[in-house]
Image: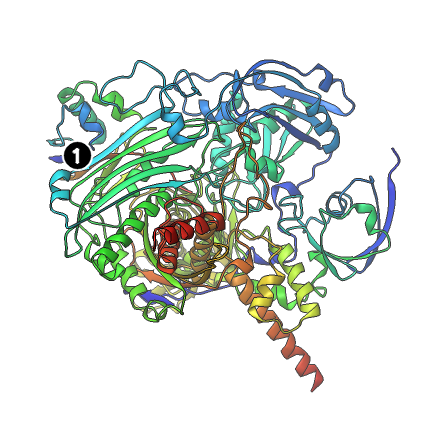
């Protein structure tokens, strides 16, 4: 279902053509990074730390280098040490440990050999002497005085006074408004709780992979799986100490990212091995390496207190939010602080955030990073308020709903947003208006994510037969090529299948930021539209040449040049491109821009669950999600993003977690034990696309990739409470935990 | 170490390759036969991205030793279409937007074909359980399940028309 | 005059001032004037890795040369990351 605010009639935007890259993907021809084979190619393997925290005393590679088939061995010593203030310093120290290993799986050395087997055997023959250090994996433990220290050069920033001792707490963030004492004094209901979540992985099905081919001219070509090949280029250059001009990055098809492929792991290692061996080198991670060395999104501990007046108006919020960042500091607590109460207008609040390093892989974005944990706390407590006041949970949210001109908790005033429309869409849905089946529990939750703009480039070339090639720098992780083609078709007035959308490498298209923050269709789409509008001006000029009139006399409408005074028959685009050679040469246009005015995203979701009281197993019986897309360019892939986000949120809520043993070694680094949802775990996921156009985009796009993962955790937790009467404030809601909560409830006489 | 010579049929053609005793069939298909459709998502039989049909049976090719293929008949995603004519599953996956990143798609198509070959008119629940060995992280399975059901309907209709 | 707002965390650099009016045509000029008002603040705000700016609600990641419209509302906020 689509609920549209109001929008002009489009011919292509909002239709559902088969995606241009689809055929290759259903016949097995689409080429992912691991599928590339080059003549003379070597296979690489990375040696990783077995310890969660240890000093590297010595690395001896002599035996490995002497083994048959081995062509290159590298360690941290082969890369330059970046200055302390270099923004990529931690990236380079994550890719290859220097003096210390900071988590189990931290890379120590890499080998290239003539076969995968030889590379593996050689890596095993590298002798590393460690001095094992005490480790810390838990936020509260890492924050405590006397905890094992990961870095002696990390001092807490954002404190009132400069600290004199290093700490695992990298940063303190604070947002404050109004008078929270008064706010709580005005409250008729006060609810509070501590919420705990574990590190979880993005879980893309394609492991990280790349091939690097370094020539004797000192230049290298990298094929890789990445959400942003321009960032691969800059980060690889930083780690190698190379000029970026020496590096060309060709994006392969990407087998899922969800934020996890916004940074690099393999590329500089492959380049260094290739440079040393003088041959191309392929590096492909195993699934185990993916879990141990990449990705997870932070575990968190959040203490939240909310107060509400007896009419349901939220009067005060107080939050203490600590996020893990893994082995190096990140922005995660800060983001959590900015999101936690954003779906609500609250006049009085104090929100504090703490960023905590622990001995786990360096945290990376995962779809609306930091927001789901924050929503778990906020939307669980909002549900408690609704129950205490005997109010409908959606009516309570509508009462507290921000709209344009209200001030967001993180500072600026909200532009036009679609939260109210999402709440109303769920309230009015068949799902919400029906009673849950007997024994089923129902939960509602909302979620916010910023969406971002950033830099994008696009080149559009018209071919002599009247077709167009659209080249952008945004890797397509969820159907964005189809969206680009649809916007170009709408602009140029030619059939969407007459447009070939292409993701260009770093040497054929202008700089483009990473496909992240739900920005590709918004920002890169804006560049495509701008290039097409330039082309339309050029086409009018060419028509004027053909008609021997002034270009002011020509207008472009519906795919053809028309003479304003009607003195000539309209000229279709193909008629003009056919004559382009005679009227001035090829027709092409490029647009590069910093996209401004990203539209904030909101989603509201409702779910019905059943809970097996004997095993504690939660089954999702029904799920409906409403999300403000601004404008859905290709509704199939908007729905796909919404459904995918929900499914990941369900996995996070019910099953997924990093589990470590006493030595800090991950115990479940595979899909058997780190169980993501399978088809039989889920129902159909009903979607309601809400369209409140973003006024800052030519077609009203907001971006849809991320916010869908925010509401599922609290929606499910609220539904489990509705079904069982047990409030669970720690993830995952796995059978043992749910069973324990039910047992405790029974013990309480509940 | 001498390598094992394996003879089999792949996608209807006679095929032969050399492998080591411990090689996975997935690696033989990809590295020796150049059939890159089957993907390695885990190497432990948990994700189904490497699904193939071996003598009509659905297998994770990462769990099959390459020498076991001797004398067998193998179908990979490259062999599902009838020449230029896509299999109804492929067509329905395209029209139903059942793929996003596409890396799990070959495995899903093979697993869905295995299902429809033995159960041409499955229920939604039967589809979900038949595909439970294939992981997709992008779609939430909704459009995949709908597309398999749509393909089943198309194939049933085709049979009925052929029978008339 | 731009209305400049500071988050609670930033107010330790402004001696507790939560907002102030500054006559500045660009972010660069704004930062220079803020430094005169609150010595030491620029070193904190200047780091693109730690601060973005929202001008009338539009979040700009690397804003040094950005023009500031008259009477704009300016917030210094955390830079965003995304998945």
Q: Residue placed at 66% from the left, 83% from the top?
A: B161
Q: Residue furthest bottom?
A: B164
Task: Where is residue C47? Give x, y as percent.
Answer: 31, 25
Q: Nearer the viewer, residue A196 or A2?
A: A196
The vertical placement of A555 against B39, above or below, is below
Badge 1: residue crowd in 10 Å (few <14, some 14–19, many ≥20): many
Numbered disc 1: what chain?
C
Task: Where is residue A79? Give x, y as percent.
Answer: 55, 18
Per the image, the residue denoted by label 1 is: C5
SS of the residue at dot 1?
strand
Task: Where is residue A494? Give x, y as percent.
Answer: 45, 62
A490 horizontally vs A34: left or right: left
Q: Residue placed at 58% from the left, 25% from the top?
A: A49
A338 horizontally vs A479: left or right: left
Q: Nearer the viewer, residue A516 or A521?
A: A516
The vertical placement of A272 against A712, above or below, is above
Dividing the picture into quadrants, the one containing residue A628 is bottom left
Q: Nearer the viewer, residue A258 or A578?
A: A258
């Amino acid at each position: 279902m689509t609920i549209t605010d109001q929008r002009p009639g489009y011919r292509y935007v909002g239709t559902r053509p088969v995606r241009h890259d689809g055929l290759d993907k259903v016949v097995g021809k689409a080429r992912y990074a691991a599928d590339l084979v080059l003549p003379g190619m070597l296979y690489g393997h990375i040696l990783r730390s077995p310890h969660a925290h240890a000093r590297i005393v010595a690395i001896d590679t002599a035996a490995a280098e002497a083994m048959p088939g081995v062509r290159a061995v590298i360690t941290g010593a082969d890369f330059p040490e970046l200055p302390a203030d270099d923004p990529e310093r931690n990236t380079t120290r994550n890719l290859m440990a220097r003096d210390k290993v900071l988590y189990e799986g931290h890379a120590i050395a890499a080998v290239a050999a003539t076969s995968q087997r030889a590379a593996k055997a050689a890596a095993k023959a590298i002798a590393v002497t460690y001095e094992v250090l005490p480790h810390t994996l838990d936020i509260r433990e890492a924050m405590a005085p006397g905890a094992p220290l990961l870095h002696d050069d990390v001092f807490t920033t954002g404190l009132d006074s400069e600290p004199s001792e290093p700490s695992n707490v990298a940063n303190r963030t604070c947002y404050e408004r109004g008078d929270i004492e008064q706010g709580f004094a005005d409250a008729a209901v006060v609810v509070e709780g501590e919420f705990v979540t574990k590190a979880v992985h993005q879980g893309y099905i394609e492991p990280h992979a790349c091939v690097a081919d370094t020539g004797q001219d000192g230049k290298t070509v990298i094929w890789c799986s990445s959400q942003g090949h321009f960032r691969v280029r800059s980060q690889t250059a930083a780690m190698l100490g190379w000029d970026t001009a020496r590096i060309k990055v060709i994006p392969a098809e990407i087998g899922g990212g969800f934020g996890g492929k916004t940074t690099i792991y393999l590329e500089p290692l492959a380049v260094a091995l290739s440079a040393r061996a003088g041959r191309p080198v392929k590096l492909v991670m195993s699934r185990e390496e993916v879990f141990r060395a990449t990705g997870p999104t932070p575990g968190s501990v959040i203490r939240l207190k909310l107060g509400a007046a007896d009419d349901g108006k939220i009067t005060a919020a107080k939050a203490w939010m600590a996020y893990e960042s893994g082995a190096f500091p990140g922005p995660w607590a800060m983001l959590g602080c900015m999101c936690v109460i954003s779906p609500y207008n609250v006049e009085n609040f104090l929100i504090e955030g703490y960023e905590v390093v622990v001995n786990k892989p360096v945290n990376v974005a995962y779809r609306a990073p930091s927001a789901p944990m924050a929503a778990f706390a906020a939307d669980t407590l909002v549900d408690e308020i609704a129950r205490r006041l005997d109010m409908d949970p959606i009516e309570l949210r509508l009462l507290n709903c921000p709209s344009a001109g209200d001030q967001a908790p993180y500072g600026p005033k909200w532009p036009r947003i679609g939260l109210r429309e999402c709440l109303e869409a769920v309230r009015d849905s068949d799902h919400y208006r029906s009673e849950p089946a007997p024994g089923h529990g129902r939960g509602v939750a909302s979620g916010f994510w910023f969406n971002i703009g950033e830099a994008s480039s696009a080149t559009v070339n018209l071919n002599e037969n009247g077709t167009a090639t659209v080249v952008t720098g945004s890797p397509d992780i969820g159907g964005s090529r189809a969206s680009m083609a649809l916007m170009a078709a709408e602009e140029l007035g030619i059939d969407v299948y007459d447009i070939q959308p292409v993701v260009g490498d770093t040497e054929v298209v202008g700089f483009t930021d990473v496909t992240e923050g739900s920005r590709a269709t918004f920002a890169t789409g804006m560049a495509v539209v701008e290039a097409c509008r330039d082309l339309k001006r050029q086409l009018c000029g060419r028509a004027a040449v053909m008609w021997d009139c002034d270009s002011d006399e020509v207008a472009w409408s519906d795919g053809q040049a028309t003479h304003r005074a009607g003195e000539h028959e309209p000229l279709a685009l193909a008629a003009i491109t056919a004559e382009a050679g005679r009227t001035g040469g090829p027709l092409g246009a490029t647009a590069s821009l910093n996209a401004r005015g990203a539209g904030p995203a909101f989603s509201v979701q409702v779910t019905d669950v059943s809970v097996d009281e004997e095993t504690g197993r939660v089954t999702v019986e029904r799920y409906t999600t409403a999300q403000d897309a601004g404008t859905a360019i290709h509704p199939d892939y908007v729905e796909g993003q919404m459904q995918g986000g929900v499914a990941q949120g369900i996995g996070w809520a019910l099953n997924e977690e990093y589990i470590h043993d006493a030595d800090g070694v991950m115990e479940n680094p595979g899909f058997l034990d780190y169980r993501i949802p399978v088809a039989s775990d889920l129902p159909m996921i009903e979607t309601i696309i809400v369209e409140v156009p973003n006024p800052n985009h030519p077609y009203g796009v907001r971006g849809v990739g991320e916010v869908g993962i925010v509401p599922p955790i609290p929606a499910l937790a609220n539904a489990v409470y509705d079904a069982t009467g047990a409030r669970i404030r720690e993830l995952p809601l796995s059978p043992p935990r749910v069973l324990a909560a039910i047992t405790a409830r029974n013990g309480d006489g509940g | 170490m001498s390598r094992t010579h394996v003879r089999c049929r792949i996608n209807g053609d006679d095929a032969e390759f050399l492998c080591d005793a411990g090689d996975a069939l997935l690696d033989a298909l990809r590295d020796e036969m150049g059939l890159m459709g089957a993907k390695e998502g885990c190497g432990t039989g948990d994700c189904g991205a490497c699904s193939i049909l071996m003598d009509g049976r659905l297998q994770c090719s990462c769990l099959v030793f390459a020498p076991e293929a001797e004398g067998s008949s193998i179908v990979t995603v490259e062999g599902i279409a009838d020449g230029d004519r896509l299999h109804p599953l492929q067509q329905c996956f395209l029209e139903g937007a059942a793929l996003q990143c596409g890396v799990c798609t070959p495995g899903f198509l093979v697993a869905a074909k295995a299902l429809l070959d033995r159960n041409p008119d499955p229920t939604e629940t039967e589809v979900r359980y038949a595909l439970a060995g294939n992981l997709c992280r992008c779609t939430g399975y909704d459009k995949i399940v709908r597309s398999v059901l749509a393909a089943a309907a198309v194939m049933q209709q085709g049979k009925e028309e052929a029978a008339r | 005059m731009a209305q400049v707002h500071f988050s609670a965390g930033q107010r330790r650099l402004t001696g507790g001032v939560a907002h102030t009016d500054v006559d500045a045509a660009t972010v660069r000029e704004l930062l220079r004037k803020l430094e005169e008002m609150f010595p030491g603040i620029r070193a904190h705000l200047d780091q693109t890795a730690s601060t973005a700016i929202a001008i009338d609600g539009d979040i700009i990641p690397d804003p040094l040369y950005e023009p500031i419209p008259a009477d704009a509302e300016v917030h210094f906020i955390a830079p965003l990351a995304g998945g």
